[in-house]
Image: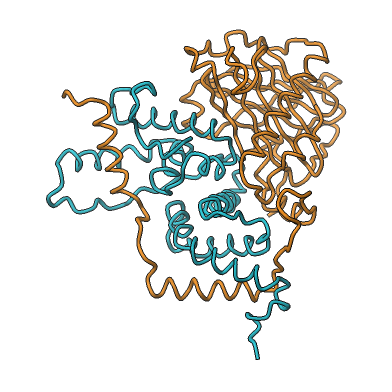
Chain colours: A cyan, B orange
Amino acid sequence: MSTPSESPAAAGAPPSERDRFRSVYAATYPDLLRFVTRRVHPSHAEDVVADVFLVAWRRVADLPAELDNQRAWLFGMARRTLLNQYRSDRRHEALAVRIAEHQPSSAGVDPELIAARLDLARVWPSLSTADQEAIALTAWDGLDGPAAAAVLGITPVAYRLRLSRARRSLRRLLDLPHTSAAHGAALPEGNPS
Amino acid sequence: MNTRPTDHDTLINRALQDLDAAPPAMLTQQQQRRADDTLEDILESGATAEVGPARGATPSRAPRRLGRGILLVAAALALTLVISVSGILGGGTAYASWTASPTPRPTAEHEKMAEQCRDYLADSAEAGPPIEGIPTAADLRGSALVLADSRGDWTYVVLEGAEGLEATCLIEDGGGFLPAPFGGGTAAGTYGFMTDLPTPGPREIIGTGLMGSSADEGAYFSTEGYVGRDVAGVTVVGMDGTRVEATIVGDRFAAWWPDSEAAMAATAPSATYLVTLKDGTQLPPTDYDGIGPHWEE
């Protein structure tokens, strides 16, 4: 006798959809948890992730086929779930992204890198939330340009411009020389194709 | 210090990786157990998976309504699309032609801009995967022009559509949208669903949006909403004291004005609204919270 969780009829979905959802859940849960943890207190993150997957289950037919697109789809849903928590202040446009509260070990680390960590931790809260989001999506969430754009609900071109602006802001705060796009290498680009 | 910029960037990239608040790691046993429990809870929750229609088909209306509840904030904040070519071409003039009073334009010009706005936003909507509660390209293409607020070479377009859809664009004359023109022009836009359609009293105004945005031309603020039938005029005062005579068409108003990038980035947008009634009465000044829709919690 099958348990309720094994009964497709009980959930109103064919076995293939349940299996597919289980597979997507297993593949994306850790990344989604990390995505949310960067944006809310860790004690709250698992609840948000559960809310997101509940909606994802209702919309399992809409889940993209590729893993990268699934992650972007879920990240976008999580972002909107979190923004909704600001409904009393409907003017929020972007989510603040947390930076590590503690410096990692400095044993044997290049002093310049240690200084860069300290500088970055110091100026990060001064970045606008939109700039934090733009940088974090590629630097920490590991998305390429089109996927990051999908999370924000904007075009890849718009994301590239937003990321460029965020990089300029970060450089300004760090008091670094400006690097134009023509000079090539720059702060986290991800793959904003 | 003689470090090349790329060295700085490399260093900062490494620092970023080191300061990830949620670095890559396996789930702990407890986390994995809770994740497994959550999965079973979801599958047993009674929440029914939508089986079809296939992606690309006309979306169901039922989840859209559910989504509108989720996206109370969407009309005011979601989906800011900033596209600019002016900066690529050498920098803008910070809306030098902007005027405090609206610039009259033929209706046909505004309709053309509305069409540009629709096309651009619809193309943007098609660029990513469909997301619950976010307007689809079809929703946007079905929207209608509510009003257009022209000031100098720039026009702020407000569109509306089914189920509380509201969309806006700021468009430059003779410009357009990337990638086609490359001949100048900046455009920015937003779209989202409003949960409840505002119904202001005769002597009231209700705001549906107040937003700071940024393009290479410069930062700007915009606001729009509904006016009661006894309202003759709305003047919006920006954070830097800029006074803007809003455009009113029917029961809607809208206005936009340039401001500094710092003002846009540093604070939540705010503005003061001065309302004049048809009998000459001036209502007490109020901020956006004073005219905002009453969201249901």
Image position of B272 with respect to A55: above or below:
above
Total tally of numbered discs in the picture: 0
Of all residues shown, which one is farthest toward the bottom? A1
Residue visible at 46% across and 38% down? A134
Q: Is residue A173 left or right of residue A50?
A: left
Q: Nearer the viewer, residue A82 or A67?
A: A67
The quarter of the image holding the N terminus of chain B is top left
Residue B296: percent from the left, percent from the top?
71, 52
Residue most toward the left? A108
Q: Quadrant of residue B44?
A: bottom right
Relative placement, left or right, of B106 versus A188 is: right
Q: Residue A18, how many percent across, how many down?
A: 63, 71
**Which quadrant of the figure contains the C terminus of chain B?**
bottom right
Q: Where residue A24 sits: x, y (%)?
A: 54, 63
**Residue at figure coordinates x 74%, y 47% from the top left:** B195
Does residue B98 sit above or below B115 in this rendering? Answer: above
Position in image of residue A66 (x %, y %): 55, 54
* A113 versus B96 height, above or below: below
Residue toward you, A25 or B189: A25
Q: Relative to residue A132, is residue B174 drawn left or right?
A: right
Q: Identify the residue at image location x=53%, y=50%.
A: A72
